[in-house]
Image (cartoon, coloured by chain):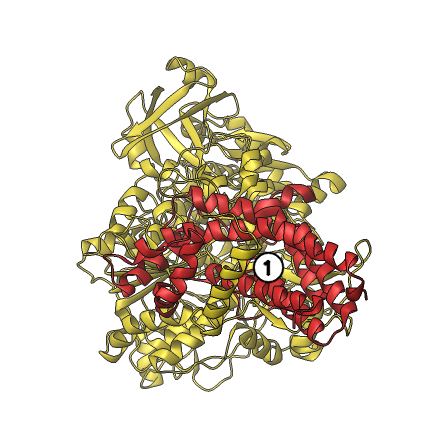
Amino acid sequence: MATPRNDMKEMAIARANVYGLLADVFREEPSESFLLKLAEPEFSGILNALDFSLDDMFSNISHSQLTEGLALEFTRLFIGPGSHISPHESMHTQARFGEPNSLWGASTVEVKKFMEAAGLKVDDSFSGMPDHITAELEFMQQLLLEEAKAWTKEDNGIGINIQNIEKRFYDEHLSQWIVNFCDKVIAAGPHPFYKQFSEVTKAFIEFEKETLQDLLDEVSEDGRLSA
Amino acid sequence: MSKLNRRNFMSLAGASGAALAAGVGTSKKALAGNVTFENGGRDFSPVTGKERKAIPTACWQCVTRDSMMGYVEDGRLKKLEGHPGSIRTLGKLCAKGQAGVNQVYFPDRILHPLQRVGKRGEHKWKKISWDAALDLVASKLKPLRDAGTPELFMYQYGRHKASQAATMYDFMGAYGTKTIGNHTSVCEAAKWVGQESLWGGMYDNWDYDKTDYVVNFGSNQFETHTNHIPTSQRLIRAMVDRGVPLYTFDVRLSNTAAKSTEWVPINPGNDGLVMLAMINVIMNEGLFREDHFKYMRVSADHHATTDQKIAAIKAEVAEFTPAFAESRSGVPAAKIAEIARGFAKAKSACLVTYRGTVMHFHGADQERAAMLLAAITNNLDTPGGRVMGVGAGWSAPSTPAAKIHKGLHIKDGFKGEAAFPTHHVSHQVGPVIKDGHAGRPKVYWWSCYNPAFINGDNKEWSSILQDESIMPFLITSTITYDESSQYADLILPDVTYLERWDWEDMVSANQIAEFYIRQPLIKPLGEARCQGDVWPDLAKRIGFELAWTDKKDFVRQSCEMTSGVKEAGGFDYMMKEGVWHDPNDKGNYGFYAKEVDVSGDGVILDAKTGVYWNWKKAGVASEADAMSAGYLGTKGAKSSYVAQHIEGKALSAYAPNTSFTKSGLLDFYSDNFKGKGLPAFPTFTPTPEHEAMADDELIMTTYKVAVHSHSRTTHCKWLAEIKHDNPGWINSKTAADRGIKDGDAIKVHNGLGEITTTAYVTEGIVPGVIAISHHFGRQHSGIYGSGKSNPIDGGASPDPDAKNMNWKKHGVHPNAIIPNSSDPISGTQRWMDTVVRVEKA
């Protein structure tokens, strides 16, 4: 039965899925099995409906060659040596902290604190810093899954509270750099895989701006969702 | 791509959910833990919640390796300062040291293992895992070891000291290769060889806390000294508090010369000659002190009387009058005599030398002249004088060496190139490998080293690294992409020194050894790994075990087995305090005068040399054989040295602790030198290239500036902002002769090539010379050092702060026109002897 809480839960899980997928895309070079999944009609059909096509990517090349090519492209785009697009917030937004850009910059610290305040920390096996795009997207995914749990438990207070935290993290961090980051990746003339996923990421981050506000507005307007 | 709305968003979410549920992406996670708002999690006040930790550690920006404090806030290194409890540094840290923060966070840093996928120098790389990287390394090294040819693996290092070197040597010993190269010949090898031929050891210190007079030849003491912070502040204090005069002989008006009591301009390659002239004055005017003569040997006779020694020294230096020295050095004879008298009459005096003196033809002999000047005035190893330095003596875990343990003979230059390459001829390793007659390594691995930048004729080095037929497989451990790593087959991301463990042992300035450690201030960025952690892992993959599990374990074990440190509290104490010294230590003075018990089994007195030595320890068949062959006639006898017979006593004297076989006397008359056709007594030997110079040619010298090391700091933006260009210093008269004005573009060229820089026309350099510092002109190493962050044309810097880079010049590298040319005594690279022509560009 469609209830406001079920709607909220469904939306939270849906958003968590997208955050999770995008976190994986930027985590490291894609595995061959991941690429095979993308090539399946079931998956590509959904993407095609969004004018998001990876079909060309798979033509005239074996999956193993594609995997190898994307590994090199991942290195070129995000690792270096030399000119690359660092997937870390502090390399893109330090000006607002009055500091020059550097790895482990002031925004890294802010993100780290934010995550720790939520009970999370960067896993020892993860080679990025706390403000790596993957860590930030995964953080949102974790918040959303927790939000979904709250709606399941009919704990409106926690659910609304987490929504506010998501909004704050989005406003203070995701919105500050990821669109710009994606534009830089697109401008670097990347392989279609990274071009398309950067466009999706950019569109999703822009979509989230309205979504987060809409959800909070819905909460405040619907008395059944009051804490 | 359509704009997302709620409806098509749900399609995307469905696809994403399906992909995630299928587990087709990676199963790895960036975050650990659970969202725990209900339980509060951790909380931080936006205003006061900062917790700043102070962690004792040690610098690595240069070889001085100051102990220091790192201040860490929220996992981020914020600041580096001197360690207030250090007796070496007295709480000071130089600009380079403070800019160490840049080493960690510079945006062009290498953070992941990279495997080459294009041609060498094509700059195409693939990120691979550490497992894959080490499996690849093991696949190259294990077959060499299994085949009984471990020597075909060569490792060469730049800055490796203390436990960084000890862990590496432990691995290499257990693996079985002795093909281990260093970098000392481009640093100051001639200085050490000169000293080792005399007092048996190396590394002098200058007792500024107690001195009354300082004469400095060719050392930029206040800017870049090898033991900079510990010694410079003490010299400044001596000058300011006690009015100690400092006379600096230098080709160039360095900041040290500018802060001296007097800058004495001198032509390149004549430091030793001026010292001999000072000795001439002191001897002939009777200003010498006989106190140390009993420890000196100045003629073939080991038993000469003091009067005989005085006569011999006078005879040896007779031709080196101040007038003669003036004719070559440009230093007025009266000034030489004045400073000689001041030096000799001072209650105590320090004689300082460094690269300006020794990086020349016969540089090692010039160092011997410096030692003689100190000795005849009783300023050698006496309070206030030139003293043998002391550093911490750590005990450390050790792995047994492999049964097959050997090396290629490619470290000491070409045959006959150097008589005593006791610190090797590192700049010639590449050319010797190219030559091939002494064999070629199949795997060449370098670390904290940039051979294609720091050696002479560096373009030749580049071509050698690029040639797969000469260098089949190249590995580098580095934090930055540079002139050498661009040719590697495998780049391993090293940690910075601020992310690793070490024990440290650099020489103290006050003759009291300080034990100190380096500990990581932060978790290594990215996938950077300390080599000390890599060695045990690699050993297992090859098939052997080390006596320690990682670098931290190595340091921990060392702390628990080192006398003094152990009793103070061992590893826990050192982690907390960072430094330790023996509070009862009075300083290392007069070690040579200690009486030695010579009653031990097998100890005999060698009549010729006056050496007590242990024939049993030397492995001689019988005492009769030992007596017959004598100390100098017995191979390896120097390791059984016990004492020197001096004035009826057995004294420790100056034991032959290095490769020179000698008595316990200071060998100013050296059989070793004579045996190789070199001057037995310190003398003046003109530089052949200088003797053959045409009228329009100049001598090019190099130097260091205060804020850079040779090749490891130009990517530090705080330092690059201060110094990023290296114009050629040229005297106004020399410039005028060539129609050159200040700021003009000039060409500097010789048979090796040509470089273009700008002229800095000044009275602060002697005529006939051009001086160019050697840090700049980087091909790579990041946006701040080279002006480009991308090895391939095009592309933007990953660091938006680069837009604030207010300098456009990045200098020129003089090594391109400096040949690899060795001092025939020591094998040291002759940085200061290059002959060039200079003209307006």
Chain designation of label 1: A
Q: Is residue B194 above or below residue B605?
A: above
Towards the viewer: B572 or B353: B572
- Amino acid tagged 1: Glu
Observer able to see residue B51: yes
Chain drawn yellow in the picture: B
Quarter of the rendering containing residue B366: top left
Towards the viewer: B320 or A142: A142
Q: From the image, which quarter does the C terminus of chain B lie in? A: top left
**Residue A195, percent across and down?**
41, 49
Q: Residues within 10 Å of mark 1 (few under 14, many from 20)?
A: many
Q: Is residue B762 above or below residue A189?
A: above
Chain drawn red in the picture: A
Q: Residue at x 25, y 32 (%)?
A: B751
Question: In the displayed structure, does residue B403 sit left or right of residue B19?
Answer: left
Q: Is residue B706 above or below residue A16?
A: above
Residue named by callout 1: A136
Quarter of the rendering containing residue A141: bottom right
Q: Is residue B760 above or below residue A172?
A: above
Q: Secondary structure at mark 1?
A: helix
Q: Residue at x 42, y 71 (%)?
A: B24
